[in-house]
Amino acid sequence: MKKLSLYKIRDMALTSGIAVYDAQELSNLINKNKNIVLVYMNRLVNNGLATRLISGKICFIKDDFVIASQLVTPSYISMNSALLYHNITYQVPKYIECINTKNSLNYLDLGITYHKIKPELFFGYKRYDKAGSFIFVADPDKAVFDGLYFKIFSKPDIIDFKKDIDFTELLVHLRNSKTRGINKIVEMLK
């Protein structure tokens, strides 16, 4: 069995475009047994070639948006964090706010929060290249919708956002939605 150097593993990960790995994903990348990969993961972290994010997950890039977007999948960056990314607001939120369909999670040490949304409302985001990897970020109109859905934004906030954001496409998408509780939000965005 051929031994891989830690630098080679790091380079393979960086070349793949994916920054965050669990043991199974890294095992698939380097074609080694998962138990061997766990040893490699510890050595990568101990040698400063990767950062341990949470138990069982490491990252090869030190970019908060990349980490937030790839730590929990599927997810996308939204609300104030997405509006900051799109230069609509300049207020830096305390935590990077993300949306996913699995569970609400808080990784306060990493500065990331995940809000669970119904699968039928998991849309309105795009993939962007960042730091040699990628991130998923909500479109501005969807970021505002998510903020209203999770009661982070209020009606006065919407008045400000309407100066910079067109909600027409989002309203067309939501027009036939049967999701409970969004009618009030749709009315605010009109």
Image (tube, rainbow, N blue to C red):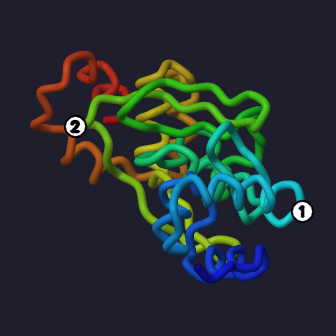
Residue at x-position 62% and y-position 74%:
13
Q: Quadrant of residue 118?
A: top left
Is residue 24 at all visible to an observer of this figure?
A: yes
Q: Which residue is mark 1?
A: 47
Q: Which mark is residue 170?
A: none
Q: Which residue is mark 2?
A: 120
Along the line of sight, which residue is nearer the eye, 139 or 50?
A: 50
Task: Tell me which amino acid carries mark 2.
Answer: Glu
Residue at x-position 40% and y-position 52%:
166
Q: Is residue 157 above or below residue 87?
A: above
| SS of the residue under disc 2 | helix
Q: Is residue 85 above or below residue 109?
A: below
Q: Quadrant of residue 160?
A: top right
Left or right: 148 with respect to 101? right
Q: Residue furthest front?
A: 1
Residue 42 point in image, percent of width and height: 77, 53
Number of dots carrying numbers: 2
Is residue 85 at all visible to an observer of this figure?
A: no
Residue 185 point in image, percent of width and height: 34, 25
Left or right: 39 with respect to 104? right
Residue 73 point in image, percent of width and height: 45, 47
Along the line of sight, which residue is nearer the eye, 76 or 83?
A: 76
Along the line of sight, which residue is nearer the eye, 111 or 7?
A: 7
Task: Tell me which amino acid carries mark 1.
Answer: Asn
Rounded to the nearest whole Å, what is the CA distance between mark 2 and mark 1? 43 Å
Residue at x-position 20% and y-position 47%:
173
Nearer mark to the viewer, of 2 and 1:
1
Quadrant assignment for the N terminus? bottom right
N-terminal label among 2 and 1:
1
Residue 76 point in image, percent of width and height: 48, 48
